[in-house]
Image (cartoon, rainbow, N blue to C red):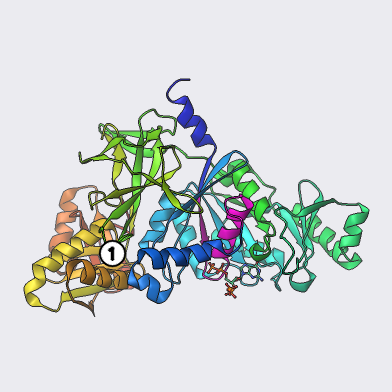
Amino acid sequence: MPATARPAAEAARRRTFAIISHPDAGKTTLTEALLLAGGAIHLAGEVRARGQARRTRSDWMKIERERGISVSASVMTFESDGKVFNLLDTPGHEDFSEDTYRTLTAADSAVMVLDAAKGIEPRPLKLFEVCRLRDIPIVTFINKMDREAQDPFALLDEIHDKLALDPAPLYWPAGSGQRFAGMLDLNRREFLRFSRPSADEPVLARAERLPMGGNSVSEALSEELLAELNEGADLARGVLSPFDGEAFRAGHLTPVVFGAALRRFGVAELLSVIAAESPSPRPQNARIDGADVAVDAGREEVSGFVFKVQANMDPKHRDRVAFLRLCSGRFVRGMTLKTAAGKAMNIHNPLMFLAQDREITDEAFPGDVIGAPNHGVLRVGDSLSESGKISFQGIPNFAPEILKRCRVKDPLKQKHLRRALEALAEEGVTQTFRPTIGADMIIGAVGALQFDVLEERVATEYGLDVVFEPSPYQAARWISADAKSEVDAFIAKYGSQIAEDIDGAPVFLGKSAWEIGYVQEKNPAIRFTAVKERAA
Ligand code: G4P
């Protein structure tokens, strides 16, 4: 077999996806149900229980324990029906953070979980924008059908109106709440019966399928509910888009599955849709020797990029684990990979994160995520490859939505503070802006929790007591123009509101979103961008 055949074949059976949802829509429950449906775990409650055990065992960041949340995203790998699923876990708390955004850059597709009673809530909307930016296709799971739900047409209309995505239901529900009886497979004309098992009954991995028109369906559904189902399904077929795999993978259409994650209903069906329709690792845009190249999964050379760095997994060793999303080749334990900046790293203990535990792996393929323990050598956005020549594009930085001034209580420690803030910005904890005028650094984040994480880490790792103070700014935009002279002229004019980011790129700090719009209108030659795609 040629050396590239295996990575290509292995990549083809990988599905690397993330779940996006609003808190309480059921992401944790669905994750657990997916792991169960995929045969990766056998007992309900293991995801939660294990999370707690791990936190107490390895003494994760205090803030995680205090708030009972997982600040950082991780990955769970499981194999089912010949497919390898890498489920990237996005943090489950109320707050947004850049971590969540960046996790999506490592995913090839996403599952959007909606609470059937609530429809689209703010958080998936925001994460959806990131998916759109990256052309990430989305499968929709309408959860909690065993509770009183909104009308399915109203839910699908909302997807259409708010996300500008064509919803294509693959199933149609029969009732909701107490009346919920199951759903009709719109393609196969089979009815998936929902049953409410009592506490000591095992939950079925797959729902029972009854042929429509048969006696068993009329026994399972009241006459009224059956008529309602037929009417709804006919109308859905008539007015809604039929499923189209191409349109889904191009990000224009979302297949919709209904279910109840808590009752494991609809979950195996969701997994089948991901297996059959969601994309396997796609070619990734990169620069090699000054040329734009799409790095295909089947490329022989091993390559990948770091989308997340987790510190303090074990405080005794002060280790950091860089999460590397592989993009091409067959990775073998002990390989030496180089960053585009020329740093070489031997990865002798690559971690894989199986549903049950993490363990050292001997090989990995495109779409997989491996954890590379290191002592701060790797930072978010780094590309790694055998030649060191591949530089992946597009680990985005998002314009911060909260800007604060950061001051260290001991004025003699100003330099230390600067170093700490820069190191943590490199890791992607928060963003740091150095104003061209004035000494105080400005810290930017997309979520308030990032400040708590920063404060905690600056205190424990650098021994510095810091305070955050309000800054006069509320928005930041990267600025650029076709001609450098235009940027220079703009900087000269707005000097007091200009800062540099960690890479030295110029940023305009606005006192309000309105001001940004105003300044933008006055300076049409300048581009103001809310997302900076950093070449890795
Ligand atoms: P999240 O990670 O998105 O924040 O949500 P999570 O899975 O924790 O679910 C939020 C709540 O919704 C949980 O209830 C969970 O049991 C419930 N839930 C999830 N899926 C379903 C479903 O399909 N049907 C019904 N009826 N409920 C569902 P909780 O009372 O807040 O937590 P817990 O005490 O049950 O753990």
- Considering the image in quadrants, where does the C terminus appear? top left
Q: For the magenta stretch, what is the residue range?
A: 17-42
**Residue at x 49% of width, y 36% of height:** 11
For disc 1, the marked residue is: 430
Query: Quick one: which residue is furthest to the top in this view?
Result: 1
Quarter occupied by residue 303: top left
Specify whether 314 is left or right of 222: left
Specify whether 169 is left or right of 85: right
Q: Is residue 20 magenta?
A: yes
The residue nearer to you, when weighing 232 against 409, is 409
**Residue at x 28% of width, y 46% of height:** 382
Specify whether 288 is left or right of 281: left
Quarter occupied by residue 94: bottom left
Q: Residue 380 placed where, x, y %?
A: 30, 52
Q: Is residue 361 above or below residue 166?
A: above
Q: Is residue 258 magenta?
A: no
Q: Amino acid at mark 1?
A: Thr
Q: Is residue 67 above or below residue 390?
A: below
Q: Secondary structure at mark 1?
A: loop
Q: Residue 63 placed where, x, y %?
A: 35, 73
Q: Residue 192 placed where, x, y %?
A: 78, 55
The residue nearer to you, when weighing 247 against 494, is 247
Q: Is residue 403 above or below residue 184?
A: below
Q: Residue 61 placed where, x, y %?
A: 33, 68
Confirm whether residue 320 shows in the render: yes
Quarter occupied by residue 502: bottom left
**Residue at x 68% of width, y 61% of height:** 259
